[in-house]
Amino acid sequence: MFKKLTLALVTIAFAVMANSCQDPKSSFLETKLEKDNLNTVAKQIMDENVMSREDAILFNSAVNRLGQTPDSILGKTVGQLINEEADLAKLNIYTQMYGTLSKAEILMKHKMKYLGLKPMDTLEQSYDYIVFEVDNTSDKSIADLQGQLRFFNAANQLVKAYPIELSKVMGNPEGIKPKETRRFAYPYFHQKDNQRDEIIRNSKDLRVVWFPMSIAFTDKTEINSSMEQPIEETKK
């Protein structure tokens, strides 16, 4: 009996400690935002000084995001806006996580190496051929690879991005076989009155970064990702 009572008291003590460690809740979470009380609610929350930092950030973010169309926040409670913003923030994190992990897997399936640029001028048109190699490091044949080769100057400013859609220059329906390395020359129109085209053609100190977006295999499987961040830098 004594042991059971002691255990119960310890459990209660831990529960009390846990509750005491939680941030106190603002008394204005149930307050509805109306056309004439926005300034008042803001001042009340500040004066109360109880709302947690996380909730304050979420509330401020929600008002900033929806404030361009003020009617979208009217009639909602402070807590409602905080919860909606928290859900959106979680969704954004999931999206970023998906993109980051997808990019990582795409890069595990291949290697891209930029080799250089070969200009070609004819009487009718000028071209820049971007030359690169793709090494298939996966165990399946690559049917397509999409992304961008981005060129940066010494100040880390983007000069130009060239979209790559490998299937357009693949030529082989069997794709790039596992462990195979293939070289490609991807043609782009060159405009002599375009300053960026001239910089790409004539500069020797540009940094080239490969931004993958998707990879597809001949067995019809595919991995897609967003292109928000650079994942891997290629080297000449």
Image (cartoon, rainbow, N blue to C red):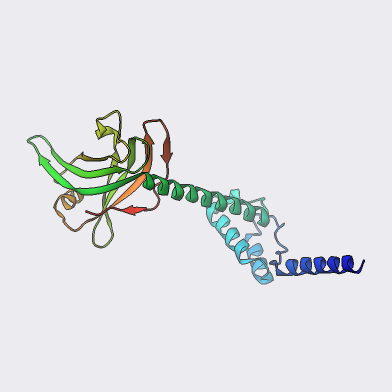
Q: Work out whether 77 lies above or below 145.
A: below
Q: Nearer the viewer, residue 99 or 42?
A: 99
Identified at 68% across, 69% down, the residue is 50
Most distant residue in the top direction: 173
Quarter where residue 235 is shown:
bottom left
Q: Nearer the viewer, residue 214 or 37?
A: 214
Q: Nearer the viewer, residue 158 or 107?
A: 107
Left or right, 31 with reference to 10: left
Most distant residue in the left direction: 123
Identified at 19% across, 58% down, the residue is 205
Q: Work out whether 184 lies above or below 59.
A: above
Identified at 55% across, 58% down, the residue is 61
Where residue 147 appears, as percent x and y from the top left, is: 33, 43
Where residue 168 appears, as percent x and y from the top left, is: 27, 33
Left or right, 195 with reference to 86: left
Where residue 162 appears, as percent x and y from the top left, is: 26, 45
Q: Nearer the viewer, residue 179 or 187?
A: 179
Quarter where residue 139 is shown:
top left
